[in-house]
Structures are given as structure tokens and as C-alpha cells.
Image (cartoon, rainbow, N blue to C red):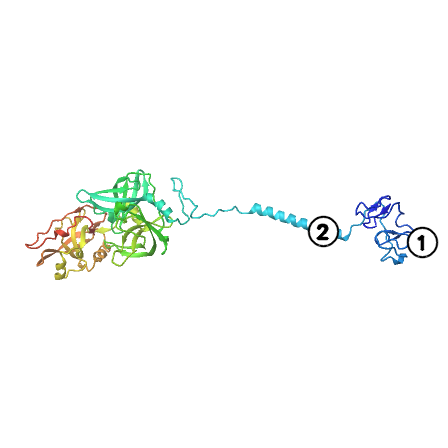
Amino acid sequence: MNFCTNCGKKLESDMRFCPYCGFDTGNNAPASQPGGQNDIISDSGAPVPETGAEETEGAPLPGYGFAPETQEDLPGSQEIEIPGEGAPPAPSKGNKTKTVLIAIIAVLLLALIAGTVVYLRNRPEPVEPTTTETMTLTRPTETTTETTTRALIPSEISDKTKSSNVGIVVTTDEYGVVSEGSGFLWRERGDWTFVITCAHVIDDYEGTITVHTFDEQEHVAEIVGYDVKTDVGLLRIHTSGYDLVEIGDSDELKVGDPVYAVGNPDGMQFFGTFSIGHITALNRKLTTESGYEMKCIQHDATVNPGNSGGMLVNGKGEVIGINSSKWVKIGFEGMDFAVPINDALEIIDYLMEYGYVPGRPKLGFRYISIYDTYFYAPYYYKYEWPDGSLVIMGVDEDSDLVDKGLHYFDVITEVNGQTLDDEFSIVNILNSSRIGDTITLKVLRAYSLERVEEFTVTTTLIQDRGSARVIELPDTEMDPETTEPETTRRGLFGLFGF
């Protein structure tokens, strides 16, 4: 049995070339067993013949260059004990290092795989981002309620609100069209649909009120009620199935928020006009034509005559106000006002239940300001009438003043001994009074510039029920050569009342 002098592997006795490393051992015949008495082993494991054996001087030995002359000349030569036949060679230090490295890599790979599995099992479900351009809203049904959680772009708001906008037209047989305005479809109850608008669009008119919807249909409307002080009115039409508005929260508004006005400027000619603006002030105190102080939303979305009663909506397309008025003065633009929807709904609740706002007293007469007629200009200056003087144009049929002897164009200058110094004087008096209280009026009746009669009228305050038919009063017979104030008579339309 021989061993390879290069790799130390065991060889068959007749093998010259090592089958493991291919080394030429130079053996053609069986060699003596390594480790015998007469064998010397090199540091590479090759047997070296003892001194004196036949050899060619300088002949190379397997695994070396030239053979040294003696054993001592072998570099690093020593006796090495070779494992017995059949025993595997001992592993080298390099093999151990490789094994350790492979084990470490295997452990790291297993840890990486385990961590990946845990992450995939516990990761949250991906959430697809929504954008203004890709999100689609659907109108609410009877069983679901739409909740808008983002601001809409203007075209989406227009699409959402246009079918809830309506036009309101009031006509009489005598005067034809006497009022045009806007409104919006608010609520259904049975076969009836309720329409919110402004009181000044529908009050004082004993004609026919028609509601025009976006599908070009006309519906005869009934007055549910209106409140002149807050300028809120409510109608109903005998139909259903239309898109209704969504109501927002006007208490959440901030200055600078975008708002959109939907209505009919100049009436039906420009039905469904959509304008854009921003809130420019909140809780703006204004006094209505009836003398009632209100806190309004001020904005700059364009509104014009005919927009009254139309909706003011927020960035979600929700109604947050009722467009009511604008500041009209040379040099001023973009000052428009709306009744906050939260305040309006409190009034509408009363109108739904009673048709009016309970607990509000009224005298029950219609008037114009002393400044609204040129006829009384010379009287005003000659007799120094107070600035808050009121010219009587008629009385309500339910008023206690019906049989008190008043005439058309009589002038009231004092109430309960208090001079009407300005347009709000009578408002303050009535606000501090109650239904059933007795009121004394100082009245002036002009027959000519030289003859003015003064008298008092005592009356009782009644419940203000909003809608009441106005009774025309008799004219005063003027003195000869005195022009009667016929040109100032405005019929019974567009008057103010207390």
C-alpha cells in the first residue's frame, strides 16, 4: 500500500498517478509499508531511501528538486507517524474555518427568511390614496346618508346643487309679475316638498306663487309661513322625488372659507347662475328693512336682485346660508349678506309648526319712511318732523287699528310719548313690549301745507302671525289747490310693517 506524497491520500500499490490530485508518484511497484525500520519519511509524507541504497547522484526525488546526500540534509525532515491503514486523514484547520462560516451564513439566511414571513403576515393592508380628480360621490338614497369628507372642486359643487335650486315668481291679476327670487328644495313630507326662500320674496303679495324647478316644470306653491324680522320664508309644493339640499353647519365657518352662491339673478332669465367667492366676515350685524337686527354672513360671491332666497353653500356643497341682501352704494362692491342656516332653521321649525314665530307682538300697519316720499318734504322742514316719522299706507285685517279712523298717508311721529328720532325707535319700543300691551300713537294728518291736524290713537298689540291681508285706508280730502299724494301710492306691494 502506497500514499500520495503530495496530498497524503492512500493509493493502490500499482498506481503511479494519484487519482485525487493527479500527482506523479514515480512508483511502478509496490512500496514498503511506511513507518518501517529502514524508511525515512519526508515532511510531505514521501518515503526516502536509506543511505547507501542504489541511486543516481543528483537524481530528483518525488516531490522535491534534487535528492540530498544525507537525511540530515533534508529540510525540516522528521519522523512522522502515519495513521494506520483504512483510517481517514485528520481534517485540516482550513476545513474547520470553512464549516464555521457556512454555519453562520445558514443561520443568518434562516433569520432573514423568518423575519420576512413575520412582516408579510402582520403588515397593514395598503390604502389607495384618493384625489379630487378620481373620487366619485353618489347622491344619498332613502336608506343611506352621504358624508362628504373632503372639499369638492367648483364643478362638482355646481353638479351637486343645481337640481335643488328653484325660481320663485309671484303674479297678480292686476299687476302681473310683482316679485321674482330664488329658493331651494329642503325637505319632503309625504307628497309635499318644502322650499326655503326669503320672506321679502313672498310677503305682502295676494297673488299666485309659482315655483320653477330645474327640469322646467312649474308648481303652484302654498305659503307655510314667513318671518319678516329674520327674512326667512317657507313654501310647499305638491310634488316629490326631487334632489334635496344637504344642510351644513354655519357655526363652523371661518373667514376666508370658499363659498358659492346659487340662484337666479334678474329672475328666471338667468336661472341657475353659479358664482364663487369667500367669507369676508362673520356675525356681521345688520338691520333689516323692518328694523330687526340680525347677525349675517358677509361674503363676496356675486349676488344680484333675484338671488334673494337662494342658497349659499360651502366647499362640500352643503347649504350654510340664505342669500338675503347686498350693500348697494356707489364705490362699493362685493359686500353681500346671507342669513346663517343655523339661525334660519330655528325660525323654520316655528314656521313648520305654527306658520309664524310665537311671542312676537305687532301693531299691524304698513308704512314707508318719511324719506321715501317727496310730497312731505316741505312739511318735514317747516314743522321739523322727526327723522323716524312713518307714513301709513295700510293696516292688516287682524290689527286693532282697523276701526281707529286712520287714513292713507297719515304720519306717526310718537309712540307712547317717545319721539321717533330714527328708523329704529319704533323697533326698540315694540321689542320691549308684549302681546296685549296698550300703545298710544301720535298721528298727524296734512290737509295742506298750512293746515296739519294732530290727534292720538290708542291700540292693542297683537300676535304677529306673518301673513295677513292688508286693508286699504280712505284718502284724506285735501284742501283746494293742494296736490294729493297719488303719485307716491305704491299699492300694497313692497311695504314695510310693524
Residue farthest to the right, as pictured: 52
The amino acid on which the numbered mark 1 sits, given as a three-letter code, is: Gly
SS at badge 1: loop
Q: Indicate which label's residue lies in the foreground, 2 or 1.
A: 1
For this rendering, which residue is in front, 197 or 4? 4
Q: Identify the residue position indicated by label 1 in the image.
A: 52
SS at badge 2: helix
Quadrant that contains the N terminus: top right
Q: How many marks?
A: 2
Of callouts 2 and 1, the N-terminal one: 1
State yes or no: discs 2 and 1 in contact (Cβ < 8 Å): no
Q: Is residue 185 visible?
A: no
For this rendering, which residue is in front, 241 or 384? 241
The amino acid on which the numbered mark 2 sits, given as a three-letter code, is: Val
Distance CA(mark 2)–CA(mark 1): 49 Å
Residue farthest to the left, as pictured: 480
Image coords of residue 90 (percent x, y): 80, 50
Q: Identify the residue position indicated by label 2 in the image.
A: 100
Q: Quadrant of residue 239?
A: top left
Label 1 Cα neighbours within 10 Å, binned few <14 / some 14-19 / many ≥20: few
Q: Quadrant of residue 215?
A: top left
Label 2 Cα neighbours within 10 Å, binned few <14 / some 14-19 / many ≥20: few
Image coords of residue 409 (percent x, y): 14, 53
For this rendering, which residue is in front, 257 or 390? 257
Q: Is residue 101 visible?
A: yes
Q: Is residue 477 left or right of residue 65?
A: left
